[in-house]
Amino acid sequence: MPGKQRKDLFLTAVGMRAAAAGAPKKNHQNLRILFTLVLAMNRKISVLFLAVLLFQAATARADSIKDALSHKYKNQVLALRSPFTAGDQKFDSAGQPLNSRPKGPWLLYGGIFVEKLNLSSDTLRLEGHRAASYDDKKNGKLMLIRYGKARRIEIHLDQPINSFDDAQTVLNRVFFLEGDVAEHAKPEFRRADDNTPTTEIYHVGKDGTLAPRATYTPEPEYSEQARHAKYQGTVVLNIVIDKAGKLSRIRLERPLGLGLDENAMEGVKRWRFNPATRNGQPVAVEMNIEVSFNLY
């Protein structure tokens, strides 16, 4: 065999041995890369699975709290601590209103009849109509009257609610959940500039307090709904007249419905009085009045 051919064969053999020796190293490197990728994917899958489990647990807890809240407060009248605004109302977790304060000389207070309740990680939402409830002595039943359009009350949470007690704590900052809740739930107008202390409000006939004298009492308008239904009766209002003779509070004590309650309260806003007196001095006084609606 010529020398050149022997040299070529030798070089070929050496190259094959070198390639054979290098192959396992390359395969090992590929296996290590593949193993690393599998581990990384497993970690991502594990994290994703854990996140799903935590989300499901949080959702289940929120649903459980929502169910408990609905069981306790749905179809109940809850009284707001703040006056109503024109549209939906928003509060923070501390119970502070996020809406602008209502403008005008009068502020409207009262309660809503809870028809819907929802809870998410960042919002507790209640929906319902303004409402008044009263005892119908004739039928021996508690009656409910709704007013206007449905309203939405949103409480924006700074952190998720983790228990029913936490939810009640947040709700109690926005609504009256304790004490004389029924009184707070009654629809009531208050003058925006009223600053008469409760301790300085007297009652006619007590401590020598003489009644105020009405000087202007225009009749309220009859609602078309009540007129069409030939509905009549008497609305009872509780009013506070300040020592200047101006009405400062008008609260609905016994409603009629069919638009007559709103008309009675709006009409009485225009009434004028000479103030009540005690020991010859003008004083603020609280008293009940009747506003009758009759068809002749």
Image (cartoon, rainbow, N blue to C red):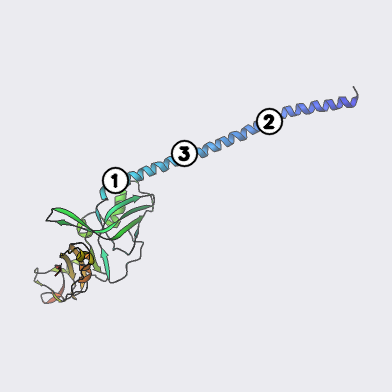
Residue situated in front as seen by the camera: 25 or 184: 184
Q: Residues within 10 Å of mark 3 (few under 14, many from 20)?
A: few
Q: Which quarter shows the C terminus?
A: bottom left
Q: Position of residue 274 (x, y in %)?
A: 15, 77
Which residue is situated farthest in the top direction here? 1
Residue 94 can be seen in this image: no
Q: Secondary structure at mark 3?
A: helix
Q: Which residue position holds label 2?
A: 25
- Disc 3 vs disc 1: Cβ atoms closer than 8 Å? no
What's the residue at 68%, 30% (across, down)?
A: 25
| SS for callout 2 | helix
Q: Position of residue 29 (x, y in %)?
A: 65, 33
Q: Secondary structure at mark 1?
A: helix
Q: Which is more foreground, mark 1 or mark 2? A: 1
Kind of residue at badge 1: Ala
Vertical relation: 153 (above or below) 243: above
User: What x and y, as percent, mark residue 45?
Assistant: 50, 38
Res 137 quadrant in image = bottom left
* Residue at the spot of label 3: 49
Question: Which tag, 1 or 2, sits closer to the chain's start?
Answer: 2
Residue that numbered label 1 is attached to: 68
Point out the tag, 3 or 1, that comes first from the N-terminus: 3
Q: Is residue 54 visible?
A: yes
C-alpha gap between disc 3 and disc 2:
36 Å
- Give the residue drawn at x 55%, y 35%: 39
Q: Which sits earlier in the primary sequence, circle 3 or circle 2?
A: 2
The Cα–Cα distance between marks 3 and 1, rounded to whole angstroms, is 29 Å
Q: Amino acid at mark 3?
A: Phe
